[in-house]
Amino acid sequence: MDKKEKILKLTKEYIEGQKVKKFVGGETYIPPSGQTFDGDDVSAIVENALELWYAEGKHSHEFERKLIERFKYTIRDVILCNSGSSANLLAITAITDPVFGERRAKPGDEIITVAAGFPTTINPIIQNGLIPVFVDVNLDTFLPDMEVIENAIVEGKTKAVVLAHPLGNPFDARALRDICDEYNIFLIEDSCDGLGGSFAGSPIGSYGDLSTVSFYPAHQITAGEGGAVLVRNNPMLAKVVRSFRDWGRDCWCAPGKDNTCGIRFKHKNMGGLPDGYDHKYTYSRIGYNLKMTDLQASLLVSQLDKLDSFVAKRKYNWEYLRLHLGEYKKYFRFQVPLEESEPSWFGFATTIKEVAPFTRNDFVTYLESKKIGTRLLFGGNILKQPAYKHVKHVIFQELMNSDVIMNSTCWIGVYPGIDQEQLDYMIDTIKEFIEERTK
């Protein structure tokens, strides 16, 4: 056994030899989300570290290839980046590029989305000078009505629909794909909460012209941080996304590579540059540097092998909570999936009904006091957040349910690190709370 093999063997033994702390109800905190690592994951990072190449490299390309294979080639390109939020920024910025002619989104054009979502699904719309058009959502699914979205489209002015799968609950992506095709507008599918889920037999993330995923520790697989833009079937979109990710450069050489095009010093008519200007330093867009490291990608390659088991555990945990808390539907409105969907659940959400003898604040305060982590549905009605008070926008449909979500919705965890003992403790604690409040 050489030194490298010994280091990797010892790394795996060290990680897998760590003792798991005994769970004690009321003392051990149950987080709403978290990462799940094993010895293979950590060994993958260590092996990459020993190779002394940390920028985008072979592991990045391996993960991109394997993710395309997992999607059964319903997507053509995967472009890794440093976060799911950056992926959204890249996706929305890409559709503003002049190369898309009349289809491009220009400042003042409209993008349809929902107010009950995560800020960085919406922020790139604003940051690109576009106008978000907000529709409301259903209280059972947290999803908008597809007919309402279609009615909100203004031909010539609406350039895209940007929609997330909230807490992993797939929207009717097939119907929305058809709507966007009919009006020749972009569909940007924010799949950050739901990698591994599907709708009508196809993976979520495969319906959008551009789709985004996140590898933050709360999500289905993680690189610590990280994200990706998935491109359905448009080489030009992929090229534009990569350009914006990589400083806005015109060159497509991978890091550490030169002259992929074979004419590095032979390009002509590149703006005001002299003919033959080094293509590696030719910039055709106002871009960023949003790349992922190969260290992160090496972890993703290992994590991807476990995605199916992670999704199965999330589904089991969600269904177990739903089964054992169903008797309290008088007080709780539980999130439900659409027909033909297979969610990869991110959390177990409930909305406190008006008839309940307690408020959401009562409920989450009690759970937190019992060491059960809770979260709200992100920004609630985003327009009520301080940062959005003066943002130019259009409200197509009164945001009544978005306000209800802001005031009355919360969720608890289903991530794979939550075991059976913790599930039973969570259920018993919620039952105790209900019984105390309904005596």
Image: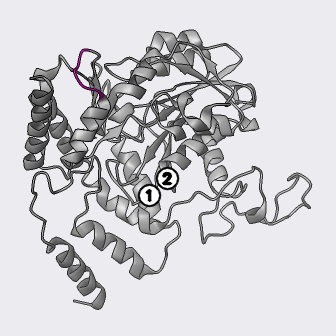
> Which image quadrant for residue 90?
top right
Viewer-nearest residue: 333 or 174 = 333
> Which image quadrant for residue 151?
top right
Query: Residue at left 49%, top 76%?
Result: 53
Q: Main secondary structure of the magenta part?
A: loop
Specify start and end residues of the magenta stretch as a single range: 355-359
Assign a secondary structure to mark 1. Answer: loop
The label number, if any, that marks residue 225 in the structure image: 1
Viewer-nearest residue: 362 or 125 = 362
The label number, if any, that marks residue 83 in the structure image: 2
- Residue 48, given in percent of the width and then of the height, sits at 39, 74
Q: Which amino acid, mark 2?
A: Ser
- Residue 373, given in percent of the width and then of the height, sits at 26, 46
Q: Contact, CB < 8 Å: mark 2 with mark 1?
A: yes
From this view, report whether residue 72 is shown above or below residue 112: below
- Judge left or right: residue 411 versus residue 395: left
- Judge left or right: residue 242 versus residue 329: right
- Residue 234 in sight: no
- Judge left or right: residue 439 versus residue 80: left
Quarter holding the C terminus is top left
Q: Which amino acid, mark 1?
A: Glu
Query: Residue at left 38%, top 40%?
Result: 193
From this view, report whether residue 223 is shown above or below residue 326: below
Count neighbours of disc 1 (C-alpha within 10 A) and say few if under 14, some if 14 to 19, many if 20 or more. Answer: some
Quarter holding the N terminus is bottom left
From this view, report whether residue 154 is shown above or below residue 118: above
